Image: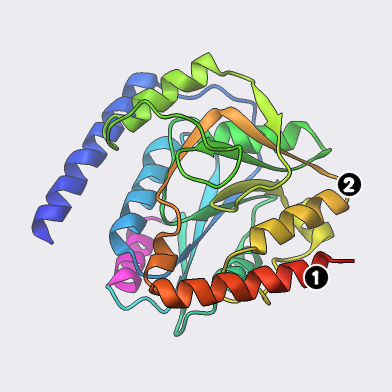
Amino acid sequence: MPEQQTELAALVAGWESVAKTLGPQVTRELPLVSIVVVTFGNRRLTELCLASIRCFTGDVEHEIIVVDNGSTDGTPELLQHLAAINDKVQVVLNGENRGFAAATNQGVRAARGQVLCLLNNDTVVTPGWLQTLAGAVGANEGLGMVGPVTNAVGNEARVRCGYRDLGELPAWAAARAIGQAGKTFSIPMLALFCAVLRRQVWERVGPLDEQFAAGMFEDDDYSRRVRAAGYDLCCRQDVFVHHWQRAGFKLLGEEAYQRLYESNRARFRAKWSG
């Protein structure tokens, strides 16, 4: 553990150096953004995620609502410590794993922002991420949700990567953002590892469907509901978020994961078969 903490401190110091070199992000004024993060185990990944938010969110006014689903690996203690030293962090501790959808809905209920960001704990954000994503939904009322491109997802949002490790990630992502500035593409489904929407859209569409148990297919379902309400979905080519993908599901074991996948797929198909 001490060795891991030393490595994390060195990595974060490098991130802070990149952020300082890039300087402040110039954007139009944005409303308060509530970042909702659900955790279940994977303390190390959660530390990385929250550290990246601190380093790369810049001057965007934000709060971080972390909902823990009964972690037993020291995650609750970590979160309580972070909340004690950072007034932007609010922690909700569940005594059991209530599932991604239910925990996300909890987080949104606790949130104050007019813009919501749903963010998995197995992600690392990069310079300018929230300025661009929150700015996109603020500038276009027809846009229901927007997300970044990434290294690991099962649809068109996956792009080729040019970084070898997390130390190289921020500078690479910042350079990519310059080269892809302003570029977007429509997408039929946004995976909710990182998705930004206005509270107005959330209230019109409703919360995530908690019938999708621990997770999987709730993002397919929500994307369909957002589009059914008349909104568009898009990805920003100029925002990159690193994603380990399914880090939480790996804790379930392969057999439990497969059962959950089959069950939620059947539920999704039944819901939308008509």
Secondary structure, mark 2, is: loop
Q: Which mark is in front, 1 or 2? A: 1
Report the number of discs.
2
**Which residues are drawn in magenta?**
74-86
Nearest the viewer among 209 and 142 is 209
- For badge 1, the amino acid type reads Lys
**Residue at the location (87% across, 52% down)?**
229
Query: Where is residue 274, by image quadrant?
Result: bottom right
Q: Which mark is residue 271?
A: 1
Nearest the viewer among 139 and 193 is 193
Q: Residues within 10 Å of mark 1 (few under 14, many from 20)?
A: few
Magenta-drawn stretch contains 79 = yes
Residue 163: give x, y in percent of width and height: 33, 29
- Image quadrant occupied by the N terminus: bottom left
Magenta-drawn stretch contains 192 = no
N-term-proximal mark, 1 vs 2: 2
**Residue found at the far top of this picture:** 179
**Residue at the location (73% across, 44% down)?**
188
Q: Circle 2 sits on which residue?
A: 230
**Residue at the location (73% across, 53% down)?**
223
